[in-house]
Amino acid sequence: MVLTTQGYCFDVERGPDWLYVRLSMSTVPVEDSSGLADEIWEQLQRQFTYRAVLEMHDVPMLTSELIGQLIVLLKRAHEQGGALRLCGLSEACQESLKICRLQQQLPNYRDREEAVHGSLPHQPR
């Protein structure tokens, strides 16, 4: 199921106990991404799970608005005993999280399997 909100498209896939959300930029640029956390949260509630892996392979950069939405989503998931994990972040996106000192709260995993298993994220050499 492909959904669009506030400058982003996301494809939702249900897995065992997890929701996989592949995020990408919409073809129509929008400055405000404030509805993204709400839209993804709604999908989590519909699927009766609070654990999500956001596949970020198609996101070239993390704006401050997007980082804010990720934090909102992370807090909501934790409040429900769930988890939010990211995978496939580009080097630029990883650097953005590092600058914001969020690499511990939002670590980057290589792929969805690594994210689900929660093993230590792949570290570049």
Image: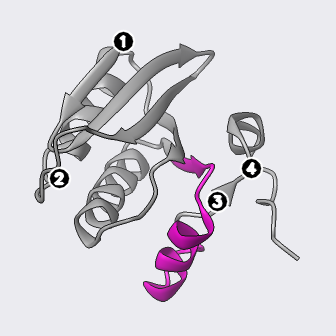
Q: Which residue is mark 3?
A: 108
User: Gap between marks 4 and 1, in whole Å?
Assistant: 23 Å
User: Gap between marks 2 and 1, in whole Å?
Assistant: 20 Å
Mark linked to residue 1? 1
User: Seen in the image, is 101 located left or right of residue 109?
Assistant: left
Asked whether 86 or 46 is in front, the reply is 86
Earlier residue among tags 2 and 1: 1
Q: Magenta residues?
A: 84-104
User: Seen in the image, is 36 located left or right of residue 34?
Assistant: right
Percent x, y for residue 87?
A: 62, 48
10 Å neighbourhood of mark 3: few (<14), some, or many (≥20)?
many
SS under mark 1: loop
Figure check: 77 above or below 71: above
Q: Are marks 3 and 4 in contact (CB under 8 Å)?
A: yes
User: Gap between marks 2 and 4, in whole Å?
Assistant: 25 Å
Percent x, y for residue 51?
A: 50, 35
SS under mark 2: loop
Mark linked to residue 57? none
Figure check: 88 above or below 94: above
